[in-house]
C-alpha cells in the first residue's frame, strides 16, 4: 500500500468526529511529528516529543501532545506557530490513539515521501473543494507555471503562497536539474500558512522562509524603501478581494504602484503590481488572474495601459474553465518581464490554452503533453492558428489583453447553416464601404428588472425580456408589465419602432426589429438597443447581424465564462457593409420574404403530414377513437 493510501485510509478513523475540512489539521501535524522523529539527526527532537513516546501512554495522549508541540516549537524556532491548528483535542481519546498508531507506522524516510504528500494533498483538496478561503493551486497549473519560469538557481517567491504547492513544485523542478532554490513566501490566511509551513517541512524544504502576514499592507521582504526582488515570482492570490486600508495603498511607501493606483473595489491589480515590483530586472513573474483583470475599465485599464507602454507584459495564457474545481471562473497566466527577449520587445504573446486539458470525472488538469505544447509555444514564440499569436503593443485595443480579442475562433455552429468557417482577412479585403455600428446609430442599454419590481398590468411598463424574442421577432402581445417607480432614466430604456435589439447575455445571440406598437415599451438589461439613423434600414441590419458574418463578429465580442456577455463599448465596433438605402431596403424585404416563404412551407408540410397520418390511422382502425378539436 502506498504511503498516501495508508494515510488516506487512516482518515476514515476520524470521519464523523470532525468536519472534513479539518482532517488535514489532524493528518499533516501528526505526520510532521513522525517526520521530525524519523529525521532527528537534522532537527532538535526531545524524547518526550517523539510520536513513538507519546503513543506509549494512551491515557495521557492529549496532555503529551500539547507538551510535544510546545517542545518542538521551542527547540526549532523556524516551526514557531506551525502546530497551532493541530486540532487533536476535538477527537475522542480512543479515536486519537488509533489514529496516532496509524501515523506511527508511516515511514517518512522513503525517497518518494514528498511526492506522496503532494498526492495526499491533492486528494484532500479535491474532496474539500475551496474551503475556508484557502487558495490551493491545482498541481498541473503549478507545473505549467514553474516550467514556464524554469527556475534552476537563485530565489523563488510566492506572495500568496497558500499551502505552499507552488514553492514545493519550484524546488522539485530545480532538484530535477540538480540545483537548489532559496524559497520565500507570505500568506495572510492563517490556516493556509500553518498548513503550508508543515507541508514544506515534510517535503524536506524546511529552509523555506515563509511568513504569516498581509502581503499588500505589510510585505515581509523589504530592502530599504522597496520590496525585495527575486529571480522568479509566481502568485495565485485570492481573486476579487476588496482593498483593505485603501489609503495605505494610495500612499504605498514601497513604491509598488508606479503604473497606477489599484481600485478600492478589487485588489487584483495591487497583487499584480506587487509581483512586478518583486521580480528582478533579469527575472520573470507569473500571476494567475481572472478575465476581468485583463479588460476591466477605470484604474485597472490605466494600469494596463501604462504596463503595455513600459513593455513589461510578455504573455497572456488563457487557461481552461473549471481547473480549480471549487469555482467556475476562467483564469489566465499573466507573464511579466522587465527585460523581454529582443525578438519580443514591443509585443505580447497570446496563447489560448482553453481546450488544452484532460478530464477525469469533473476535474480538469494539464497532461504532460498539454504542458509541453504550451511551454514550447511560449519558449519559441510560435504563431499557431487559433492558438498563439505575437501582437504588437500598438495593436492592443483599448488596453484590453483578453486572449479572445486576438485569437479568434474562426469556426462556429450557426443556424441554419451548421459549421461555418469565417475568414477575417477576406472580410477586411472586401471592396465596399464599411462603417462601425456607432456610426449608424446610437447604442443604449436596457433596464435591470429586479425582484423589487412588481408585475402590474394596469400601471406598469411593458418590458422586452429574452423569452419575448422568438424566431427573430418581438412577441409584443405577450410582454409582461412591471411597476417601476422613481427611475429618473426611464426614458433612456424606451424602445421605438425600427430599433434593432441584440441580446447581450447568453451563448445564443438574438436579433430583432422593434415593431409598431402602442404605449411605452422598455428594453430589459439582457439586450442592447440600436437606434438607427436614416442611412441604414433596420431589416437589412437585422439580416446582416443574423448572417454567419454578423454572428461571428458578435460572438468575437463576447466575454465571460459562466454567462457570455457583450458590452455596449464592444458592440459599437462591429463593422457593417453599407450599401445604398434602396439596395438595403430591397435586400431587407427579400430576407423577410424568404422567412415568410419558409414558414408557409413549414405550415403546408405540417398540414400534409397531418393529413397522411390520419389516413394511416384509418388503415390501423383507430381513427374513430379520437377527434381533432
Image (tube, helix red, strand yellow):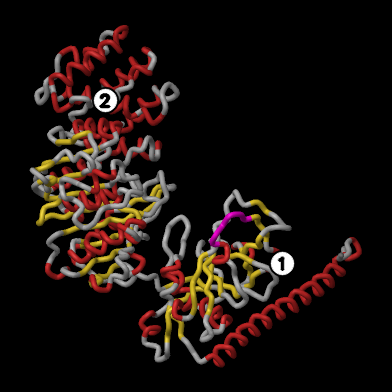
> In the rendered image, which residue does mark 1 sit on?
477
Q: Secondary structure at mark 2?
A: helix
* Picture coordinates of residue 623, whole percent (x, y): 88, 65
User: In terms of depth relative to the viewer, which is nearer, 320 or 516?
Assistant: 516
Tell whether 62 sits left or right of 521: left
Q: Can see residue 621?
A: no
Q: Quadrant of the N terminus?
A: top left
Q: Quadrant of the C terminus?
A: bottom right
Q: Is residue 59 visible?
A: yes
2 or 1: mark nearer the eye: 1
Q: For this view, does 319 lie left or right of residue 515?
A: left
Q: Which residue lies at the image location 17% right of the left edge and 24% below the top edge?
A: 36
Q: Which residue is mark 2?
A: 29
Residue at point 30% right, 48% down? 267
Magenta part of the chain: 484-489
Measured as percent of width and height from the top left, residue 354 is found at 36, 60
Amino acid at each position: 500500500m502506498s504511503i498516501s493510501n495508508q494515510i488516506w485510509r487512516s482518515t476514515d478513523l476520524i470521519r464523523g468526529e470532525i468536519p472534513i475540512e479539518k482532517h488535514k489539521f489532524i493528518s499533516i501535524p501528526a505526520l510532521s511529528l513522525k517526520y521530525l522523529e524519523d529525521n532527528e539527526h537534522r532537527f532538535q527532537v526531545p524524547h518526550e516529543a517523539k510520536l513513538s513516546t507519546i503513543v506509549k501512554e494512551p491515557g495521557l495522549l492529549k496532555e503529551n501532545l500539547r507538551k510535544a508541540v510546545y517542545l518542538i516549537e521551542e527547540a526549532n524556532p523556524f516551526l514557531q506557530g506551525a502546530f497551532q491548528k493541530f486540532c487533536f483535542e476535538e477527537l475522542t481519546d480512543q479515536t486519537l490513539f488509533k489514529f496516532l498508531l496509524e501515523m506511527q507506522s508511516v515511514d517518512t524516510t522513503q525517497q518518494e515521501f514528498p511526492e506522496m504528500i503532494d498526492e495526499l494533498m491533492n486528494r484532500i483538496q479535491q474532496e474539500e473543494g475551496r474551503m475556508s478561503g484557502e487558495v490551493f493551486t491545482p498541481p498541473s497549473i503549478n507545473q505549467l507555471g514553474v516550467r514556464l519560469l524554469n527556475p534552476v538557481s537563485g530565489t523563488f517567491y510566492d506572495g500568496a503562497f497558500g499551502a505552499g504547492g507552488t514553492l514545493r513544485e519550484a524546488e522539485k523542478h530545480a532538484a530535477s536539474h540538480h540545483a537548489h532554490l532559496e524559497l520565500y513566501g507570505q500568506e495572510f490566511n492563517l490556516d493556509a500558512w500553518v498548513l503550508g509551513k508543515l507541508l514544506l517541512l515534510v517535503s524536506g524544504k524546511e529552509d523555506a522562509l515563509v511568513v504569516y502576514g498581509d502581503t499588500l499592507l505589510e510585505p515581509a521582504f523589504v530592502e530599504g524603501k522597496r520590496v525585495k526582488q527575486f529571480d522568479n515570482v509566481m502568485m495565485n492570490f485570492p481573486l476579487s478581494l476588496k482593498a483593505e486600508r485603501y489609503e495605505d495603498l494610495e500612499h504605498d511607501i514601497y513604491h509598488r504602484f508606479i503604473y497606477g493606483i489599484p481600485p478600492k473595489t478589487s485588489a487584483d491589480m495591487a497583487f499584480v503590481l506587487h509581483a512586478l515590483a518583486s521580480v528582478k530586472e533579469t527575472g520573470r513573474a507569473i500571476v494567475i488572474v481572472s478575465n476581468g483583470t485583463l479588460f476591466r475599465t477605470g484604474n485597472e485599464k490605466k494600469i494596463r495601459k501604462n504596463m503595455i507602454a513600459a513593455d513589461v507584459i510578455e504573455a497572456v495564457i488563457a487557461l481552461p474553465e473549471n481547473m480549480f474545481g471549487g469555482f467556475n471562473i476562467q483564469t489566465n497566466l499573466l507573464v511579466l518581464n522587465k527585460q523581454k527577449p529582443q525578438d519580443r520587445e514591443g509585443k505580447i504573446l497570446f496563447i489560448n490554452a482553453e481546450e488544452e486539458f484532460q478530464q477525469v470525472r469533473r476535474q480538469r488538469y494539464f497532461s504532460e503533453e498539454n504542458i509541453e505544447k504550451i511551454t514550447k509555444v511560449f519558449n519559441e514564440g510560435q504563431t499557431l492558428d487559433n492558438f498563439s499569436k505575437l501582437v504588437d503593443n500598438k495593436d492592443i485595443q483599448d488596453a484590453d489583453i483578453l486572449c479572445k480579442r486576438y485569437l479568434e475562433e474562426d469556426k462556429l455552429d450557426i443556424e441554419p447553416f451548421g459549421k461555418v468557417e469565417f475568414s477575417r482577412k477576406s472580410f477586411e479585403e472586401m471592396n465596399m464601404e464599411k462603417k462601425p455600428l456607432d456610426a449608424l446609430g446610437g447604442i443604449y442599454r436596457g433596464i435591470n428588472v429586479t425582484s423589487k419590481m412588481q408585475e402590474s398590468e394596469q400601471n406598469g411598463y411593458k418590458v422586452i425580456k429574452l423569452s419575448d424574442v422568438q424566431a427573430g421577432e418581438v412577441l409584443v402581445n405577450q410582454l409582461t408589465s412591471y411597476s417601476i417607480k422613481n427611475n429618473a432614466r426611464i426614458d433612456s430604456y424606451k424602445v421605438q419602432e425600427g430599433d434593432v435589439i441584440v441580446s447581450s447575455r447568453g451563448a445564443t445571440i438574438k436579433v430583432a426589429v422593434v415593431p409598431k406598437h402602442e404605449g411605452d415599451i422598455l428594453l430589459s438589461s439582457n439586450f442592447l438597443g440600436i437606434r438607427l439613423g436614416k442611412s441604414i434600414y433596420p431589416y437589412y441590419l437585422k439580416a446582416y447581424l443574423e448572417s454567419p458574418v454578423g454572428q461571428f463578429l458578435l460572438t468575437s465580442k463576447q466575454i465571460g465564462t459562466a454567462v457570455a456577455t457583450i458590452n455596449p463599448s464592444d458592440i459599437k465596433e462591429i463593422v457593417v457593409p453599407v450599401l445604398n438605402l434602396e439596395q438595403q431596403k430591397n435586400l431587407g424585404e427579400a430576407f423577410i420574404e424568404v422567412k415568410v416563404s419558409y414558414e408557409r412551407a413549414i405550415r403546408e408540410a405540417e398540414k400534409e403530414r397531418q393529413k397522411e397520418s390520419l389516413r394511416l390511422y384509418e388503415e390501423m382502425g383507430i381513427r374513430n377513437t379520437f377527434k381533432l378539436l
